[in-house]
Amino acid sequence: HEDHTRSGGVKAMKPVDVVAGYECSGNSPRAIQALSGCVKYTGVRVADVLKRAGGPTSKAREVVFLGTDHGQSDVVFRQQTFKLDQQFGRSIPVQDALEPEPLLAWNMNGQPLAREHGFPLRLVMPGYYGVCNVKWLSEIRVQNERYVGNYQARWYRTIRGVGGSGKDDGPDT
C-alpha cells in the first residue's frame, strides 16, 4: 500500500486545472444561501493515479474515496441499536473514475486548499452532487463489490427507473 499523497506522490505528477461549479442541495428554492460556488481546482486526474498504482482489475466495480472525517451513528440491526463510528466515504463506478474530469486537488483558485475546503487533498467530481466531492481525502480503494457506506447506501441516494437489474451483483445497477 503505497501513499501517493506525499511528496513524490500525486504532487510529483503532472498537474491539471479543472473549473467546476457546485450548489449544495441544502439551498432553499426560495433564496440562495451562499451554498454555491465556481472554483478552479489544481491537482491530478484520478485516472492517472489509478494507472500509476497499477490500474483497476477487470473485476473492479467501484472506486471508494474515504475522508478523515467520521462520527458516531445509531445503526439498527435485528431490533438492536448499535453505536458505530463511521468514516465518511463515497464511491463512483470504475468507468467514471477513468474519465478525465475526476481530480485529486490540492489547490483552489491558485492557493493551497484551506482546511475547511479539504486540505491537504480532496476529490473533485464535476457533474456530481457536492457530497460526492470528498474532503480531507485519506484513502482510495478499488473494490469488486458495491460500497455501502452510510452517506451512500443510506443518505444522498437517487432512485432511477433506468439501468441495471436492481440486484446488487448486477453490473449496471
Image: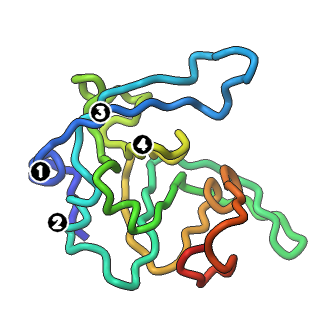
Figure check: 80 above or below 92: below
Identify which amino acid the numbered label 4 is placed on: Pro
How was this image coloured?
rainbow
Q: Which of pointers 2 and 1 lies earlier in the amino acid sequence?
A: 1
Q: Which of pointers 4 and 3 lies earlier in the amino acid sequence?
A: 3
Q: Which of pointers 2 and 4 lies earlier in the amino acid sequence?
A: 2
114 on left or right of 168: left
Q: Quadrant of residue 95?
A: bottom left
> CA–CA distance between discs 1 and 3?
15 Å
Figure check: 44 above or below 95: above
**Residue wearing tag 4:** 126
**Residue wearing tag 3:** 41
Identify which amino acid the numbered label 3 is placed on: Tyr
Residue positioned 15% across, 45% down in the render: 11
Q: Classify mark 3: helix, strand or loop.
A: strand
Q: Position of residue 153 (x, y in %)?
A: 66, 62
- Between 25 and 79, the one nearer to me in the picture: 25
**Residue wearing tag 1:** 13
